[in-house]
């Protein structure tokens, strides 16, 4: 039940939302008292009888995500190889990659025949959970954790078509005027503490998100476009929209927390991070999904166990039994250490770096236990420039940065020819990429120097470093580039430093532990930083990256035309016309260069030969329905 809406840092960047730990009594010390839902405009919902009488409904799909995937795979034909052949085949060509993926990606038989339901899966992540609270979700690690532990009433398939998951929803209807959505929830849903999951939990979660004192800018984006959420009874959930927007379905999908757990504690600690009560919940959260957290060793490991009360109700099986009894997630920041753990059997899947795919996973030590696959993924990486610093406020300077970088060295040496040149905020295979999309930058030091000269950055004192008069002082062009602590991140940032050395700009590369890095970026306490984004399910999900003043607009970018186009895009229902709007946004961003866009990275994964059922979408192998849920171990695995 994948509810992901917002785009992500694909290498587990976090958005820390807490404060320094406080001890004591009242933790909320604002001038006004905490008020639940104070950001919601007054609205008096009609009675359910009145709503039914005046509304023309359109039935929306309620589907089993696993069956959707089963039909998709069946349409692609039978597996091209036997399991034995696929497991023995080295992935050394596009053909072999396709054959391995199509064969080992086949789903378990309906009913789970042949599945080892007592199996444990040991996963790898490069960054730890910052929070287990679904409202504070902000990293790949946390999204995947919530995909296993959270309740949801909306999902989407690998092509981003939305449906309500049949394991939680009986029916879903939308009014013809697109202003109302009605869900009827199943009556056999429970939280991990045994309390029922109801529409009242959804209403309460909406009110929490829309409380000024609750600092959740990521999940509030989109949710703030809703007018009201009403629980008419335990199962009947109605969501009212402010306007008929093309993004209304996307806006329906916000995280849900249990009302009975948080309704008394939220006023004392609205940030849900500092009180002893909320700290305890971090390590023992009450969950609504298939798994519950049973162990959490910070920066080392967290462990989830299958929740029997998820798929059983009053002694009867009411949902598909999750395939793994236990999921152990190992936190290993260093990619080389992780690969050694994979080869030794201590972990069973990981993302591979280019050098690992190209030269470290081709011998018997790798293929004895594992195989590898690659697939298209809309993941991009960039340098983000803080426009409110004196160095990068001028678009000519940002363009100069992009002309300075040695892309050939990046693609031919660092990435071993495995990455693609980036052409902007939307992926070239997406429907919103402009038909006349821009060509990638290439290194042109002469053009870069001309642009810096035009912007007033010249070497006035002959010391080899460009400078400029700012506020009556001569300021050298000398800045710090933050980057994440991985071989690729350090290599790419260092390459930029070396390129800038050639044109009289001093760049200090500072590899930074990822939680510190993301705090600095979130607080705009940086000059330049390396980052990356995955993909949302709709181009409007990047609103909070590019619109003026939005929560994840880390570089302080502002363009009134871009702001207006995002607003126009969410009002347009015609897909072709929407594509033209977002295409114009793409081109404006490319002209302004708030980022130096570097490369697209496909998915490069290693999986234990014990695993089956993995498939990919543009968001990777886990962020869609059924995503993770389709992966299993057969009883007779090697």
Image (cartoon, rainbow, N blue to C red):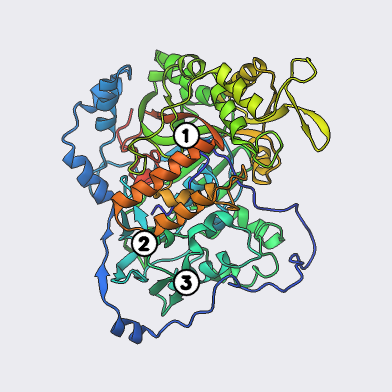
Q: Picture coordinates of residue 422 (x, y %)?
A: 45, 30
Determine crowd level at label 2: few under 14, some 14-19, many 20+ residues with C-alpha closer than 10 A. some
Q: Mark 2 highlights which residue? A: 312
Cα distance in 3D space between marks 1 and 2: 41 Å
**Do the numbered discs 1 and 2 sit on residues whose CB atoms are within 8 Å?**
no
Q: Secondary structure at mark 3?
A: strand
Q: Secondary structure at mark 2?
A: strand
Quarter of the image where one finds residue 243:
bottom left
Q: Mark 1 highlights which residue? A: 380
* Residue farthest along the front direction in this orientation: 454
Q: Picture coordinates of residue 287 (x, y %)?
A: 50, 59
Task: Specify the quadrant that holds the C terminus.
Answer: top left
Cα distance in 3D space between marks 1 and 3: 34 Å
Q: Mark 3 highlights which residue? A: 227
Q: Secondary structure at mark 1?
A: strand
- Whether residue 313 is visible, yes or no, is yes
């Amino acid at each position: 039940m994948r509810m992901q809406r917002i785009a992500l840092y694909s290498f587990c960047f976090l958005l820390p939302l807490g404060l320094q730990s406080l001890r004591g009594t009242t933790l909320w010390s604002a001038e006004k008292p905490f008020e639940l839902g104070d950001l919601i405009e007054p609205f008096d919902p009609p009675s359910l009888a009145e709503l039914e009488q005046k509304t023309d409904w359109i039935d929306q799909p309620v589907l089993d995500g696993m069956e959707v995937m089963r039909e998709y795979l069946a349409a692609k034909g039978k597996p091209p190889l036997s399991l034995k052949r696929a497991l023995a085949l080295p992935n050394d060509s596009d053909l072999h990659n396709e054959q391995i993926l199509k064969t080992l990606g086949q789903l378990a038989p309906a009913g789970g025949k042949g599945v080892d339901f007592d199996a444990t899966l040991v996963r790898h992540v490069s960054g730890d959970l910052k929070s287990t609270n679904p409202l504070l979700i902000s990293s790949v690690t946390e999204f995947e954790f919530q995909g296993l532990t959270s309740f949801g009433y909306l999902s989407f398939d690998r092509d981003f078509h939305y449906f309500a998951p049949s394991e939680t929803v009986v029916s879903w209807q939308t009014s013809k005027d697109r202003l109302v959505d009605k869900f009827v929830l199943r009556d056999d849903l429970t939280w991990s503490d045994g309390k029922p999951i109801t529409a009242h939990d959804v209403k309460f979660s909406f009110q929490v998100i829309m409380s000024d004192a609750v600092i959740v800018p990521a999940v509030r984006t989109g949710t703030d476009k809703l007018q009201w959420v009403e629980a008419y009874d335990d199962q009947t959930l109605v969501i009212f929209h402010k306007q008929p927007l093309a993004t209304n379905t996307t806006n329906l999908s916000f995280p849900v927390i249990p009302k009975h757990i948080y309704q008394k504690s939220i006023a004392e600690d609205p940030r849900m991070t500092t009180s002893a009560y909320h700290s305890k919940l971090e390590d023992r959260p009450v969950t609504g999904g298939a798994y519950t957290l049973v162990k959490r060793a910070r920066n080392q490991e967290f462990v989830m166990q299958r929740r029997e009360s998820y798929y059983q109700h009053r002694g009867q099986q009411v949902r598909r039994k999750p395939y793994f009894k236990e999921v152990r997630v190992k936190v290993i920041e260093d990619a080389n250490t992780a690969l050694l753990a994979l080869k030794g059997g201590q972990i069973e899947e990981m993302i591979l770096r280019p050098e690992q795919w190209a030269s470290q996973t081709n011998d018997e030590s790798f293929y004895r236990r594992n195989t590898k696959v690659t697939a298209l993924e809309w993941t991009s990486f960039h340098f983000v420039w803080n426009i409110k610093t004196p160095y990068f406020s001028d678009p000519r300077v940002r363009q100069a940065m992009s002309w300075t970088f040695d892309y050939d060295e990046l693609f031919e040496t660092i990435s071993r020819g495995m990455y693609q040149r980036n052409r902007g905020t939307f992926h070239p295979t997406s429907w919103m990429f402009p038909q006349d999309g821009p060509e990638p930058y290439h290194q042109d030091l002469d053009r870069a120097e001309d642009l810096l000269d035009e912007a007033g950055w010249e070497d006035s004192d002959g010391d080899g470093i460009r400078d400029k008069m700012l506020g009556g002082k001569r300021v050298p062009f000398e800045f710090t580039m933050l980057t994440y602590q991985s071989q690729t991140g350090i290599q790419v940032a260092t390459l930029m430093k070396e390129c800038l050395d050639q044109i009289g700009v001093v760049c200090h590369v500072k590899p930074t532990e990822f939680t510190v890095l993301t705090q600095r970026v979130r607080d705009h306490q940086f000059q330049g930083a390396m980052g990356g984004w995955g993909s949302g399910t709709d181009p409007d999900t990047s609103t909070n990256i590019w619109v003026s003043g939005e929560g994840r607009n880390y570089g302080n970018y502002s363009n009134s035309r871009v702001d207006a186009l995002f607003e126009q895009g969410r009002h347009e229902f015609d897909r072709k016309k929407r594509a033209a709007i977002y295409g114009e946004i793409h081109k404006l961003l490319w002209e302004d260069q708030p980022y130096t866009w570097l490369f697209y990275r496909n998915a490069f994964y290693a999986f234990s030969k014990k695993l089956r059922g993995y498939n990919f979408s543009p968001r990777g192998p886990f962020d869609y329905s059924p995503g993770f849920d389709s992966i299993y171990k057969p009883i007779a695995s090697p």
